[in-house]
Amino acid sequence: MTEVSVSVAISAPAGRVWSLLGGFDLLPRWLDAVRSSELEDGGRIRRLETVSGDIIVERLLEFSEAQRRYSYAHVESPDPVSGYVGTMSVRDADQGSVVTWSSRFQPQDPGDATIAGQYERFYRTALHHLKALVESGLDRP
C-alpha cells in the first residue's frame, strides 16, 4: 500500500475549521476541483462531480465529531488506484489548528511512482485553499 499525508497549519480554532472540513458534503465550498456533492444512503455516500466532469463516489467509513475526523473509501473513481481510503482531520495547535488529509491506496500499476505525488500535490493545494478561505473569513456564510 502507498500512503500520502499532508498537513497545513491554519490560524483559526479547530472547531471553526471543522465546521467546514467536517461536513461530508461540503467539499464544493472549499475544494475548487469539486463542482457538486450529493449525499445518498442516509448521508453515508457522497457523489461528487468534478469541474472536469468526472464522477467520484465515496462511502463514509468513520465519523467522529469529538475527534474532528472522518474516513471514507472510493466506491467509484477515475483514479488508477484500488483500495483507496482517505482521512480528513483537524486538531488544535498552539497558533490555531492543523488540518491533515491522508490516504492509503494501491496503484493499479505497481511501478507507478507518480500517483502518490499527484495526490500529495492535490491535497496540499486543496488544504492551502481551505487555509486561505478560513483565515480571510470567507468560510462564514
Image (cartoon, rainbow, N blue to C red):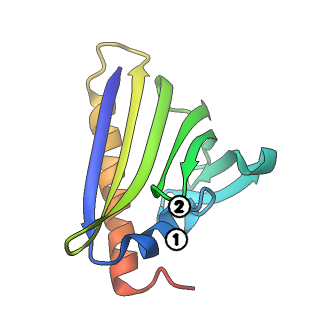
> Count the marks: how many?
2
In this view, 92 is above or below 43: below
**Is 40 left, or right, of 22 in this rendering?**
right
Horizontal and vertical percent position of residue 140: 51, 84
Q: Residue at x 34, y 13 (%)?
A: 110
> Mark 1, residues whose alpha carbon is within 10 Å: few (<14), some, or many (≥20)?
some
| Residue 10 in view here | yes
Observer-nearest of 18 and 102: 18
Badge 2 amino acid: Gly
In this view, 111 is above or below 133: above
In this view, 82 is above or below 61: above
Q: Residue at x 38, y 70 (%)?
A: 14
Report the residue that reaches farthest toward the left: 94
Horizontal and vertical percent position of residue 71: 51, 42
Q: Name the residue under label 2.
A: 22
**Is 74 left, or right, of 120 in this rendering?**
right
User: On the image, which quarter does residue 73 sit in?
Assistant: top right
Q: Name the residue under label 1.
A: 19
